[in-house]
Image: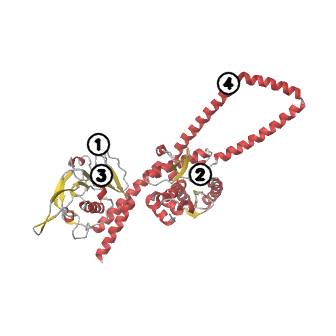
Amino acid sequence: MSTNIDSIKRKLLIKYPTFGSVIAKLEIQASKDIATAGTDGKVLLYNPEFLDGLSEKQQVFIFAHEVCHVAFEHILRIDEKDKKCWNTATDAVINALLQQDGLEMPEKTIEVNGELKTVKYGIDIPEAINYDAEEMYNKLLEEKKQQEQQSKQVNQGQQDSQGSQGQENSQIGQEQQNSQGSQGQQNSQNNQGQQKQGSQQGQDSQSQQEETDVGHDTHRLWDKAIEERKKEQQSQTKKKEKKERTEGEEKVKKEKREAEERSKFAEQGERETFKQNKIERRKQLQELSRELANKSSHEAGDGIQREGKRLFDIGIATPLIDWRKLLRQAIRYDEEYTRKNARMRNGYFRYRVEQLPIPEAEILLDTSGSVSEVLLKNFLRECKNILDNSKVKVGCFNTEFHGFTELKKTEDIDNMSFPIGGGTDFNATVGAFSRRVPNKIIFTDGEAPMPGETVRNVIWVVFGDEKINPKGGKVINITGEQLRRLYQSFIQDKDDRSR
């Protein structure tokens, strides 16, 4: 697919508001001189042909990966570290965190034992999710040292095993050397020169090996960036000394605060920063929900009722989930008329009464204080879509379950009233499901501890980015990006009704 840089940046800003200033300042350039993507800390370079071959989620992953290198100052923190271990550690940690956030890591096809196999394109170490970059580096470096020590012991053992054979060869060699005289001495000198030259070549080869790129992106730009950064730091030091002499102490303090702000991500670490970003995204979503709900609170007409007051129209919407495939047929059957096998008798059609399978569902709606009225509205829209495919009973809960109401038509949903507010207790809720009902559905924002007991065959529909792991059942996430589209639709509905 083609690359839309503006679209990728928008998605990054929505996904990672914490890195907003980094994303805004980072210059992005296309370059065919680079195979995949990379950054020197100031410019993000990408190969357009490489990016065009990726999905949209994979493109966002690549850009987020480079943004993380800049935000966490991975280039500048390399100091005197082992380059390959540091490159591997930084890639492993941020790749694990990005995948945990739902971004899709690129893949490539390789040949293994004559067979083609699809693998992750880059460093993929799942356990890295438990480490910051420095911690992961120390772990990898220790493993490298252990491997080198083991290799050294193996080589030493091989040398010892040669033992007396080596000593005998040495004696023979001494006799040959004595017989060759000055010619042997000359050859020895030549050999020493060759060994010295070979040693130098080996060191050069080792240096090149240490600088070999790891993962899907190149780190070749880092060396130049480090040199430029050192020069820049020296220049900034001189400028700072001059400023301190010519300007007041207050301005120096201000610059110090700005410098601390730029390096805060590196100081607090990758895991904590991603955790704070998740909290910030949730706050933004909640603020947007409250804002839209407040704007709609003055509207009249059929809609959600709180304490007898209707707040806004529920309306209808395209299903977010294919309920026809998801809902299972009920165990019991209902009698319904059907034209199938109808027969003409005495000039009239006679219809047979047949038992047709009708899916049956029980739905629990989270109406606690963390669920905005906009979210509740979209819960109810999905209930209407379920009602088109199943018999439905709906019940509300917060810290307690408030009973089921049977719905027979969509107007029944429009006329419902809801106990809104309070906390959330799933333990007091899941026990409300009937034992034999095959389709059990919970609509929630997921912001509460999961129930302690195992409840099977429950479909958890979670609106937002909260990741839940209940015992039993299936989880379907309506992502934050999808919610924003719902909110935009909500605003458009209001505009259309006001015209």
Label number found at residue 161 = 4
State which tag comes first along the sequence, 1 or 3.
Answer: 1
Real-space Cα distance between discs 3 and 4?
A: 66 Å
- Helix, strand, or loop for circle 1? loop
- Helix, strand, or loop for circle 3? strand
For the point 59% across and 51% down, the residue is 76
Label number found at residue 459 = 3
Label number found at residue 76 = 2
Near mark 2 (Cα within 10 A), the count class, few <14, some 14-19 or many ≥20, is some
434 sits left or right of 179 in the view: left
Residue 322 in the image: x percent, y percent?
Answer: 32, 59
Q: Residue furthest right?
A: 182
- Helix, strand, or loop for circle 4? helix
86 sits left or right of 433 in the view: right
Real-space Cα distance between discs 3 and 2?
A: 47 Å
Real-space Cα distance between discs 1 and 2?
A: 46 Å
Q: Which residue is mark 1?
A: 452
CB-based contact (under 8 Å), mark 3 and mark 2: no
201 sits left or right of 379 in the view: right
